[in-house]
Image (cartoon, helix red, strand yellow):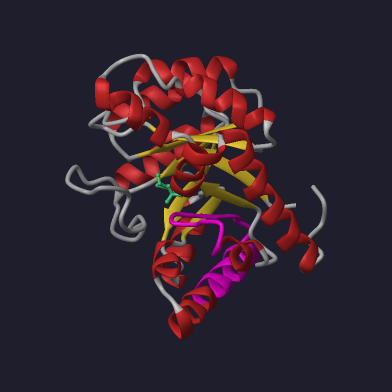
Amino acid sequence: MTKLGVNIDHVATVRQARRGIEPEPVWAAAVAELAGADGITVHLREDRRHIQDRDVELLRRTVQCKLNLEMAVAEEIVGIALELGPDQATLVPEKREEVTTEGGLDVLGAGDALASAVERLKAAGVQVNLFIDPVAAQIQGSADIGADGVELHTGQYALASGEEAGERLGELAAGAALAANLGLCVAAGHGLNYLNVMPVTALPQVEELNIGHSIISRAIFSGLERAIREMKDLILEADRSVEKEPG
Ligand code: PXP
């Protein structure tokens, strides 16, 4: 079964618009779990534009499913992650001026800081995934550096339409197959929504999807629980269509 990690950063974005106490990301995580989320994903950005330190502390104490911390390879954030002990860390590139994470990590050009972060997080018992584009050299580099898994960046696929979407999906399929062959866990995410999620889910090696913006956007109109259930239903339907093992 493909697992759904619900990214609740956007709940914090709304709260930070007023720098107040609502909406509360911890409540969002609780509703998400009750609605069937398999994981809660948050990105503690260096600029703290949405998720705050107190959020990750409270989430660590309250989330009962998988807590996945998206994070830059920055010493301050690595230190917080080591103290916090999320179930999983997804290492992402981070630029201050970007609206959201734009591209995958350059594993090959990342140098010692990345290798050291992977090693220390793994030693602390944290599963470490690297958020990368579906490019063979980056996938091989992720295995070489000792990551447990990769999260394949689906942003280009999500932006494409028609034939190009098919090509992008082909890249994701090849990337997922290579990663699994190298013994890496395979997650995928970024830009996935109710219209484009099924073909990615149907890739046999994809074990986990991390989805935020589309779910929180739908939740404004239909409520978070329903938005998550509807996404889970599509994932289950795609799983059934390719007879993915129930997990
Ligand atoms: N995965 C990673 C690594 C991300 O950085 C993000 C965005 O925070 C997501 C998944 C979720 O993307 P979206 O909000 O477009 O669903």
**Percent from the top left, x then y, of residue 124?**
52, 27
> In the displayed structure, would residue 144 be above or below residue 88?
below
Q: Nearer the viewer, residue 175 or 210?
A: 210
**Percent from the top left, x then y, of residue 128?**
51, 42
Residue 242: which quarter of the image?
bottom right
Number of numbered discs visible in the structure rendering: 0
Q: Nearer the viewer, residue 126 or 86?
A: 86
* Left or right: 24, with 169 as reference point: left
Residue 245: which quarter of the image?
bottom right
Q: Which residues are magenta?
A: 171-196
Farthest-out residue, bottom: 163
**Percent from the top left, x then y, of residue 118?**
44, 41
The residue at 55%/63% (across/down) is 195
The residue at 65%/48% (across/down) is 230
Q: Is residue 186 magenta?
A: yes
Farthest-out residue, front: 221
* Left or right: 52, with 179 as reference point: left
> In the displayed structure, would residue 20 be above or below residue 202?
above
* Left or right: 239, with 216 as reference point: right
> In the displayed structure, would residue 224 be above or below residue 185?
above
Q: Is residue 67 visible?
A: yes
Q: Is residue 83 visible?
A: no
**Percent from the top left, x then y, of residue 101?**
32, 50
The residue at 34%/22% (across/down) is 52
Residue 181: which quarter of the image?
bottom right
> In the displayed structure, would residue 92 be above or below residue 134?
above
* Left or right: 85, with 55 as reference point: right
Q: Is residue 28 magenta?
A: no
The residue at 51%/50% (across/down) is 146
